[in-house]
């Protein structure tokens, strides 16, 4: 069997991560991500604007650390 190329491997891993996130969603939804201090929420009648800036920064730092560890 031929070995998978780089893009194929990334897509398979991404699919597995999405599958696992879907399976564990009842527990993941209870985590405070998306409701951290610094996340911007503007609520008006008939309109809600949500910008999770703190969650995005934290997520970016975690991904950067993971990729840095796998690179070594």
Image: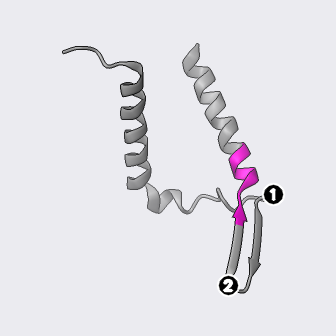
The answer to which image quadrant residue 14 occupies is top left
Q: Is residue 71 left or right of residue 9?
A: right
Measured from the top left, where is residue 43 in percent x and y?
75, 77
Closer mark to the observer between disc 1 and disc 2: 2
Q: Are marks 1 and 2 in contact (CB under 8 Å)?
A: no
What's the residue at 65%, 59% (across, down)? 32
- In the rendered image, residue 38 lying in the magenta stretch gets the answer no
What's the residue at 45%, 62% (across, down)? 26
Q: Is residue 34 left or right of residue 27?
A: right
Give residue 60's mark: none
Identify the residue at the far bottom of this view. Answer: 45
Label 2: which secondary element = loop
What residue would you read off at disc 1? 38
Measured from the top left, where is residue 36 in percent x and y?
73, 58
Measured from the top left, where is residue 47 in percent x and y?
69, 79
Q: Is residue 6 left or right of residue 3?
A: right
Identify the residue at the far right of this view. Answer: 38
Give residue 46's mark: 2
Label 1: which secondary element = loop
Magenta highlight range: 50-57
Decide: few, some or many residues near mark 2? Use Cα within 10 Å; few <14, some 14-19, many ≥20. Answer: few
User: In the rendered image, which quarter contains the C terminus?
Assistant: top right
Is 22 located above or below residue 48 in the figure? Answer: above
Is 26 located above or below residue 58 in the figure? Answer: below
User: In the rendered image, which quarter contains the N terminus?
Assistant: top left
In front here: 53 or 66?
A: 53
What's the residue at 59%, 58% (across, down)? 31
């Amino acid at each position: 069997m031929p070995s998978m190329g780089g893009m194929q491997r990334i897509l398979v891993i991404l699919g597995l991560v999405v599958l696992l996130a879907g399976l564990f969603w009842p527990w993941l939804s209870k985590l405070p991500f998306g409701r951290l201090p610094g996340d911007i929420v503007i609520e008006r009648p008939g309109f809600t604007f949500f910008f999770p800036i703190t969650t995005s920064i934290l997520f970016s730092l975690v991904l950067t650390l993971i990729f840095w560890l796998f690179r070594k």
